Amino acid sequence: MVGGIVSLVFDWFALQPLTAGTGTGGVLRREPEDFVVQEVPLYELAGEGEHVFIEIRKTGHTTAHVIRVLAAALGVSERNVGVAGLKDRHAVTTQWLSLPDKVERRLDTLALEGVDVLQVARHTNKLGMGHLSGNRFVIRVREAEGQAGRAREVMSALSALGVPNYFGPQRFGLGGVNAEEGLRVLRGESRLKDPRVRRFLTSSVQSMVFNRFLSLRLERGVFGGLLRGDMAKKHDTGGVFQVEDPIAESERAARGEVSATGTLFGRKARPLNFEAGALEAEALGAFGLDAAAFASRRGDRRLTRIYLEDGSVTDEDGGFRVAFTLPRGSFATSVLREIMKTDVDSLAPLDADDTEDAGGDE
């Protein structure tokens, strides 16, 4: 903190964890096969239609790179290649892409090392960003001998209490400094011209403020509860409502039926009010910001709590392996941070290609 302002550099240790006690420690991503991601589709494919869907498994490539190579090889515009989410290169990832039907007969000629086409199907619409239910992760943690039991304890707590829905380090660039440049963009001080990069950098500032808001909720003991003025979201239907009486809503929150949301500031996202608004203003003020600074952004709301599904821990030589499924837009590193209690993936190689303007998948 300098002059009372919190640093805009991402740091896991500046964010309050949910689970207490020591972590397992360990090392991630020693090999690509240590981090496996399987995209969970949002809907079943119709089996007919004017769009060709291909399921690919890739290693050593970003999704953006695969799209560029495919588009060039098939003679179509990159804009005509649909994708639900972006996956990085430092993992083995499986996902769907959609293509115009005219290219189907040329798919057999595709050859890209590290990319396999697993199946081909047809559907009635192009695949769009966010058209996925979530992602299934299977992750090996090395150099954590004898720590599988501790990992199971934390996984059990997360299954019961939910997972803090922090934006992970992938959102903030190598060294966690994207938000610093994003603030310069918001202030009109940046010389960057690319609108896509500018959007991504300013979204890093939105994400930093959200993380601070969520960390304050954990520090104040209201992670699983609700405050007056919160905009809460129903986990089953997605409906959002303002909390007028937090005591009356407390039972539903305790059962995990509803959770608070945080504001990703912008024109379409109104700030919170009452007690929740005061906490939100505190989070903004920590960075010397107010809601008006985000007038160039559209804005959105994001759940502060998510639930993992099918969580498990298995022993491995020298460590353990965890598996779980998360809803779209959430980060596996939020789970791993609770288990390992380290600066999870903050120094991992990150990909400039993957400047997704949504929540991110990992």
Image (tube, rainbow, N blue to C red):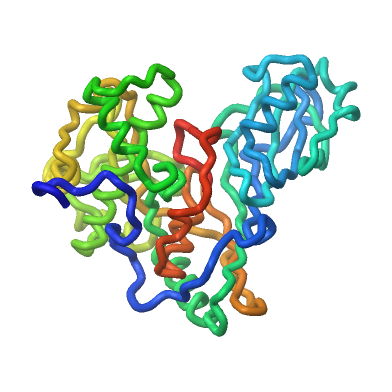
Up/down of 31 relative to 298, above or below = below
> Going 69% across and 58% down the picture, which residue do you hit?
33
> Going 46% across and 69% down the picture, which residue do you hit?
339
Image side of residue 273 versus residue 299, left or right:
left
Image side of residue 189 versus residue 19, left or right:
left
> Going 65% across and 19% down the picture, which residue do you hit?
78
Image side of residue 8 versus residue 98, left or right:
left
Q: Nearer the viewer, residue 245 or 284?
A: 284
The number of discs equals 0
Q: In the displayed image of the protein, which residue is found farthest to the bottom?
A: 146
Task: Inspect this view and state whether residue 236 appears.
Answer: no
Q: Nearer the viewer, residue 307 or 59?
A: 59
Q: In the displayed image of the protein, which residue is found farthest to the left?
A: 3
Up/down of 241 relative to 252, above or below = above
Up/down of 3 relative to 24, above or below = above
Residue 24 is situated, as x and y percent measured from the top left of the image, at 47, 76
Residue 124 is situated, as x and y percent measured from the top left of the image, at 72, 22
Residue 95 is situated, as x and y percent measured from the top left of the image, at 68, 41
Q: Quadrant of residue 56?
A: top right
Q: Quadrant of residue 285?
A: top left
Image side of residue 107 versus residue 125, left or right:
right
> Going 86% across and 27% down the picture, which residue do you hit?
107
Task: Inspect this view and state whether residue 72 appears.
Answer: yes
